[in-house]
Image (cartoon, rainbow, N blue to C red):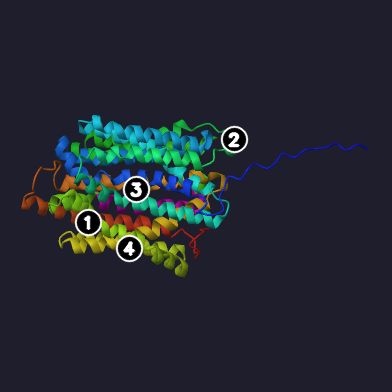
Amino acid sequence: MTTTATTTAPPPPSRTYPSLRAAWIPLAALCLAFFVEMVDNTLLSIALPTIGRDLDSSTTALQWVTGAYSLTFGGLLLTAGSMADRLGRRRVLLVGLAVFGLLSLAVVAVSTAGELITLRAGLGIAAAAMAPITNSLVFRLFDDQALRMRAMTLMIVVGMSGFVLGPLLGGTALAHASWQWLLVVNAPIALIAAIGVRLGVPADHPEDLTKDRLDLPGAVLSVLTIGLACYSLTSGVEHGWLSGATLSSVAGAVVAGVAFVWHERRSPSPMLDLKLFSGGTVRGAAIAQIGTAIAMAAVMFGLILHFQYAYGWSPMRAGLANLPLIVTMILATPLSEGLAKKFGHRVACLVGAACLAGALGGLSWGVYHGYVAIAACMVVMTVGLRTLMTICSIALVDAMPENRTSMGTALNDTAQEVGTSIGTAFVGTLIAALVTTQLPAGTWSGALVSSFFHGERITYGVLAVIVGLVAAGGALTLTDSRSTEEAA
């Protein structure tokens, strides 16, 4: 009997870190990349009045300055997640950072609202190649589940902080520089993040990637569905709700949405496996995230106009007015975790949904009663946001199969960006319909301010009902787990 000597290949070197401290370089780089994506969602919101005067823009054009970014960002997130799982997550992230930085420099050549909208759409495409991958790579930095959850919580806090810090940073910058610099500054930030990712995040191994084909028809149909749905709101104001353009865009959105579902159900390599929604946690968390994003985007867009036009505040002062959001977001963590530990995820998120609905209802009254009333509503709303967004984000990603975390984070981000598009379009459309389609330069007249307050009262009242139903409906499908680190 002969014995054949066999050699066993040595195990590949570890690509994970034993602690958050040990992973500080890649974790900081990923947080910075995620921060700049989220900041760019709201950074220009504080400058909308300035941009409107500088580029002679209408209300609906300003709506698309913010909406174009959210539209392309949200529409392409799933496609970007699919590409990352095929081409390499780090590679796609580095390409996204490079394009994002270069496009940000191009703002110096912008001279019309149309050019700015186009540029913002391009930035949204680049950001779509970054957002789901930053969150997915955070999971891959660690083997330990508790470390993964802590890192994900850190990313969520950083992202939410970036979203609300945008107006404050923008207002401060506008006091010393032109609005174009709000985008130019993205370039060095993207460069620093790319260096950190290149140094600290290990490259994907071939065995970690899938060889399935990209679902290009699914990507096109998803963008058409979201784009036409948002355009329908704008078209209703500009051309009439029963006009051919509006009815055609509504019909197109419905047809594209039905076609997307039909295609995804039959595709051998779907961009979004609809079977994932058979699990209540995935379905409910995504729905609740849409509700939170609608509330956040609507309030940010509406209050920026309120502070600068109705109150006549400077961009910097209007940015500082958002401090209740930022401070509450930091301080609300123990409260959100306490709710989850004591009552479970489902009840905690229902409390969060009630906070959102109550805050929006309060704003419909508070806009008539000064900044203190508005600030109190902002605090209540942020408690709801902090609770819902953190629990739902972790629950959704953790409920996905181990090899689908990229798609899980893409789905989470897509839900938030869809909500952002809806919220921005909803507020911009109602203000244009109820108040004015053209924002006048200079100080508003008393009659126009009174009309604006009336439009806000209706807008926030309707939003309170919509957001409350959407967020609570999603929260009801979550589990009763009382863990703050892991969702079932």
Marks 4/2: CA–CA distance:
46 Å
Q: Which mark is residue 355?
A: 4
Which residue is at a point 85% across and 36% down the rendered structure image? 4
The image shows residue 319, relative to residue 99, as above or below, that is: below
Look at the image and say whether residue 287 sits in the magenta stretch: yes
Q: Which residue is mark 3?
A: 419
Element at badge 1? Answer: loop
Q: Residues within 10 Å of mark 3 (few under 14, many from 20)?
A: many
Dots 2, 3 in contact, CB < 8 A: no
- Mark pair 3, 1: CA separation: 23 Å
Quadrant in the picture for the N terminus: top right
Q: Earlier in the sequence, mark 2 or mark 3?
A: 2
Among numbered discs 1 and 2, the one appearing first in the sequence? 2
Q: CA distance from mark 3 to mark 4?
A: 18 Å
Mark toward the start of the polypeptide (3 vs 4)? 4
Is residue 3 within the magenta segment?
Answer: no
Q: Magenta span covers which residues?
A: 277-300
Residue at position x 15%, y 55% in the image: 453
Mark in the foreground, 3 or 1 = 1
The answer to whether 22 appears left or right of 189 in the picture is: right
Does 467 appear above or below 95?
Answer: below
Q: Classify 10 Å Cα crowding around label 2: few (below 14), some (14-19), many (20 and above).
A: few
The residue tagged 1 is 321
Identify the secondary structure beneath mark 3.
helix
